[in-house]
Image: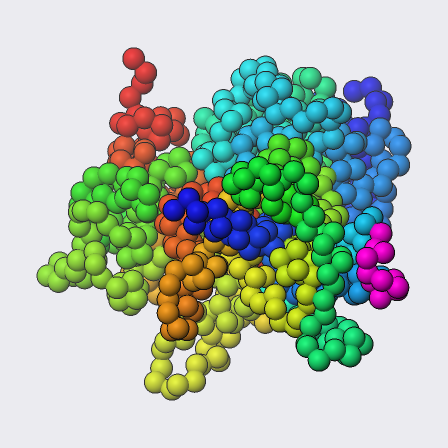
Amino acid sequence: MSEKQPAVSLRNISKSFGPTQANNNVSLDINRGEILALLGENGSGKTTLMNMLSGIYYPDSGQISIDGVPVSIGSPKDAFEYGIGMIHQHFKLVNVFTATQNIVLGLKEKGRFDLAAATEKVRQICDDYGFDVDPNQKVYDMSVSQKQTVEIVKMLYRGAEILILDEPTAVLTPQETDKLFAVLRNMRDDGKAVVIITHKLNEVKDISDRVVVLRKGEYVGEMVTAEASTQEMTNMMVGRQISLNIDRPDPEMKYRLERIRVKNLTVKNREGVTKLDDVSFVAYTGEILGIAGISGSGQKELLEAIAGLQPVESGSIEYNVDDEQVEELIGMDPLKIADMGVILSFVPEDRLGMGLVGSMDLTDNMMLRSFRRGASPLADRKEPKHLAELVVEELEVSTPSVSTPVSKLSGGNVQKVLVGREIAAAPTVLLSAYAVRGLDVNSSYVIYDLLNRQKGNGVAVIYVGEDLDVLLELCDRILVLCGGKVSGIVDGRTTTKNEVGLMMTKLGGGEDQ
Amino acid sequence: MFEFLISFIPRAVVQGIPLLFGCTGEIVTEKSGNLNLGIPGVMYVGGICGVIGSFFYESSLADSSLINPALGILIPLICCILGSLAMGLIYCFLTVTLRANQNVTGLAMTTFGVGLGNFFGGSLIKLTGSEIPSISLTATSNLFRATLPFAESLGWFGQIFLSYGFLAYLAIVIAVGASLLLNHTRVGLQLRAVGEDPATADAAGISITRYKYVATCAGCIIAGLGGLYFVMDYANGIWANDAFGDRGWLAIALVIFTVWRPGVSIPASILFGGLYILHLFIPTGTDLAVKELYKMLPYVVTIVVLVVTSTRNKRENQPPESLGLPYFRENR
């Protein structure tokens, strides 16, 4: 490669939040016509580093240069002027605005404010790149993938030359991901610089030209993607050798019970839209039942119905204590269901929304499960504190102490606390949704290991996941939802990614005629 | 019936105008994500500042018939604007710069504004040495109440549409202007974005602090004019402590009633004005309790609207999403 000027060069960048050092002395270059993957574990400072490029944060020290010229990016506005556009993990879109209104937001165009002309221009960009977005649709009516598309169109509309995407595939189906990658390759061939923050190694292999690895806020090295193996990348990222294979012990068949029997379950949401339509399945003890589906296909409603949090239209959910005693869960108080050992561990998109209270510390969050226990009118704080310390130690949660508010932890660590607490409740049925959402490789494997241990203990694990690769490696059986209906239940050992992907988008997964 | 309407509508309008000022001001403020519960106090301060200005101007004249029309209007107007602006700046400094709790700050501003108004009102009354506990600014009031010379000759049309002082028309112009600004301009789009989702607006390069300051201060000035209108036009230039009553709260109720639409606030404020004085027109006898029940009407209507809009659950009818929340960019 010739000695061309890097589009952006970062030199000795440092940034800290209070006592936490998010970035320490990081230097790296971003080139035009290249897709750069920024790889690192949770809390390794990838997002913080890129936020300094997009003007959200300001570096404590260090120098950013654009095309060789030293610049100071003090605000997102400055970043736009240098042609830097960042698509955040949490979309920066105003819900009650249309796509076009969001796209023109903050622009200083000369002349009259002409929404119709802007709409036309947006439509033009969509046609050029083959995006499927209605410029006049309100954002709150859009799917996650559509929202992401709006974000990308927004950057293109502004003529961004340097595009940063923070974990763009976390919420996409494989098909949507392929579409996104095609667009990114288009942009690279257009001479734009693309940076993608991710911890999915197969995607790094798939899309990037070069990989830069961060660990604990520091630059540890870079590789040309074509010359590196995923194992090398992982080792560099984690700093030690780890195995990339997920264990899948065979389920115990002898004492197998049909723990949960769901029959003809139909659920409507508050607006009267049918979210689950005639769903029937069985979850066995000692087995991980995976649930696949495009986000919003009824996964959340299904788990909540089992946990007693969701009103049910019709159907039944039976909890099999031992083949003689069978309890009907519908209509039962959620507290009672939880006491029977049906534990819901739901990691919502914003991670803190359900399950944890952001402003409370680790110990207090542990208490949310246990405060009703004991006869004393005073709550027992000793045991939860012990549990918090155990979770921190076992799951390698990086936190200053157990009395730190959970909102101060990075996303992955928050998740570990949540999942750790749920598992500590010794469940008989573990309902887990998006347990590894946004988690890096190392932490994900810790969670998989935990789920497998639960399975070994005879727990019926229901695992709602997004990453098909993981579902295929971890689960014994996979139930595929499509628009609230059961598209099919397949054996995790024999099915293929393609088969499941098709079932997600079409009932029964048939090929197009 | 027609006779009744001709006497009822103009009175509903003059009742409604202070509410319209307060409501428009609060909508502009709330669209920036600031919940300013200090509006009643701001309207008080707007009123008393106008009174102070015109009081000293009138007392500097040998005879109140010598009043210069331009000065007679400009002095109270500018005093009112400066007073409300100061209130807006205090509120912004506390809630935007120092990120204090908006509810607490707003309520404190109301207490402060009402107290300030009554304190200076009381002082001025002392200065006049009069027996009656009020200040009368008839000359200034006449300027504020001036109507077009031919209005009276137009019969019912003149009475319903042309019988008001210039501030009443200004209120309607401001409300229409605010509606256009919010819905059809780039500035309006950006202001709404700040109130809905400041993190998004910030990432789009919009200065959150500037928008919040400007919108809140502009809102306070608009609301303050409502206080000025009340003293100079509605009350015939007579200031008496606590005469303004609970109109400030009614203006805030009106914001919810109109679901944050300044255009709707024009008919809505007149409706509220009508409901406010309905008890004067319906024979209730001497039973004061029944009168008080009628005075409840505007609030009852607001509650009904709240129930209806929240069950209809339309996203556009909800308050700005980050209303009442402070914004700090590096907050995680």
Quarter of the figure with residue B205: top right
Task: Reply above or below: A115 against A18.
Answer: above
In the rendered structure, does residue A175 fall within the stretch colored magenta? no
The structure residue drawn at horizontal position 53% and vertical position 49%, both measured from the top left corner, is: B10
The structure residue drawn at horizontal position 54% and vertical position 32%, both measured from the top left corner, is: A98
Q: Is residue A142 left or right of residue B249?
A: left
The structure residue drawn at horizontal position 79% and vertical position 28%, both measured from the top left corner, is: A7
Scheme by which the image is coloured:
rainbow
Which residue is at the front of the view, B104 or A283?
A: B104
The structure residue drawn at horizontal position 76% and vertical position 38%, both measured from the top left corner, is: A77
| Residue farthest along the bottom direction in this orientation | A376
Q: Quadrant of the C terminus of chain A?
A: top left
Q: Is residue A252 left or right of residue B145?
A: left
Is residue A342 at least partly visible in the picture? yes
Residue span colored magenta: B58-68
Please state the total of marks drawn on the protein image: 0
Task: Reply above or below: A392 against A476.
Answer: below
Q: Quadrant of the N terminus of chain A?
A: top right
Q: Position of residue A39 (x, y in %)?
A: 64, 40
| Residue farthest along the front direction in this orientation | B153
Q: Position of residue A280 (x, y in %)?
A: 20, 42
Task: Reply above or below: A200 against A442.
Answer: above
In the rendered structure, does residue B63 fall within the stretch colored magenta? yes
Which residue is at the front of the view, A361 or A509?
A: A361
| Residue farthest along the left direction in this orientation | A324
Is residue A349 at least partly visible in the picture? no
Q: Position of residue A385 (x, y in %)?
A: 51, 75
Which residue is at the front of the view, A298 or A424?
A: A298
Q: Is residue B203 left or right of residue A486?
A: right
Q: Position of residue B263 (x, y in %)?
A: 55, 40
